[in-house]
Amino acid sequence: MSILGNDLILTIALFVLVVLSVLGVAWGLFYPRLSKNFKRDKRFEAISMSRVQVGDKRSRANNLDRRKDIEANLRKIEEQQKKGSKKKSSLKARLKQAGLTLTVRQFWTYSVISGVVTMLISMIGGMSMLTSIGLGFAGFLGLPHFWIARKRKKRMAKFTAEFPNAVDVIVRGIKTGLPLGDCLIIAASETAEPVKSEFQQVIDEQAMGLPLNKVLPRLHERVPIAETNFFAIVISIQIEAGGSLSEALGNLSRVLRSRAQMKQKINAMSMEAKASAAIIAAMPFIIAFMTYLTQPDYIMIMFTEPMGNMLLAVTLAWMGVGVLMMRNMISFEI
């Protein structure tokens, strides 16, 4: 009897524990939903979530609208650059890009003088009339354009080296709260040539009433390099679409300096090839000069006889082709 009593007690105790456990789990699961504050908490949660979703939707819409504005501005800038591409290749534009104050008429006058002087010097040196005319033609077209190309290349190199400093000046001015126009004035006063004169022209054109997004493309026309194109695009987009101008120009400054470092590395790596190309191109002229000093009659046939003139012209043409090929092989654009 005692054994049956103990089993009954254990069974009842186990049943009571199971019932209490079930009631505890049910209480923990269903009490929050049965409480008075459950509906209020759910309503507050729904309101807060709706505000977050509305804010996210508005942010996505604003980003999409700004992206569309940027794309439209980029297409507009690209169309303007295509329209102005013909002006960049004109002689007048190249004279401005070289920093020269010559007019087109003065340039052609000096070209004619150069051609006549070259032809007279060759005739006085004892060369034939055909050779003298050929050298005069080269002095008329070749030498002046070569001189402009050299001046233009040097000026673009100086501008590229100094331009990141001007962008840094503008960034510091904008971060201190100055307007963009005043920052351009400071950059024009604190930078070196040719950036100083180009920025001063931008300020003068802006003072005449032209908007900045119309003035900066003219800067790219006068200085047709990638750096000024980047600068004009960044400023135009920020004016039209908004955003942090100091951050955008700061990123542009870092990109410009990285490009300059990359160009220096490329120049250092290709210096050996350039030296080899220069030596190879100069060897025929050095050998001809040494032959003239030792055996003048032997080399002068190339200048006095018609067949020699023809061979000399063909040789120079093939040498020019070879020089251009070597130049293209060792030239890198970034």
Image: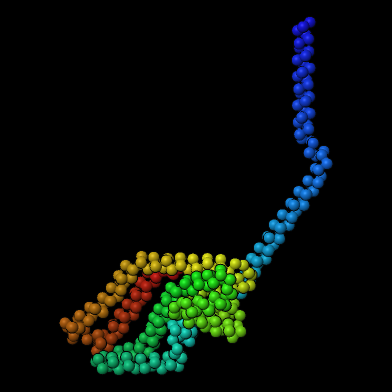
Q: Nearer the viewer, residue 27 or 178?
A: 178
Image: 42 above or below 113: above
What residue occupies the far front of the structure in this picture? 176
Q: How many marks?
A: 0
Give the farthest residue toward the left: 294
Q: Nearer the viewer, residue 188 or 219?
A: 188
Q: Quadrant of residue 232?
A: bottom right
Q: Quadrant of the C terminus?
A: bottom left
Q: Could one spot residue 65 in this view of the protein?
A: yes
Left or right: where does residue 279 sit relative to residue 210?
left
**How is the structure coloured here?**
rainbow
Which residue lies at the image location 75% right of the left edge and 15% below the top edge? 10
Tell me if 32 is positioned left or right of 184 in this view.
right
Q: Nearer the viewer, residue 316 or 33?
A: 33
Q: Residue furthest top?
A: 1
Q: Relative to 3, is 210 above or below?
A: below
Observer-nearest residue: 73 or 247?
Answer: 247
Where does the N terminus fall, quadrant-wise?
A: top right
Q: Residue at 79% of width from left, 36% of height from top? A: 30
Q: Note whether residue 224 is visible.
A: no
In the image, what residue occupies the spot 54% across and 72% down? 173
On screen, residue 197 versus residue 303, left or right, reads right
- Residue drawn at (69%, 57%), measured in percent from left and top? 56
**Residue 114 pos. (x, y %):** 35, 91
In this rendering, would 43 be left or right of 163?
right
* Position in image of residue 136 (x %, y %): 34, 90
Residue 184 point in image, percent of width and height: 53, 77
Q: Position of residue 172 (x, y in %)?
A: 52, 70
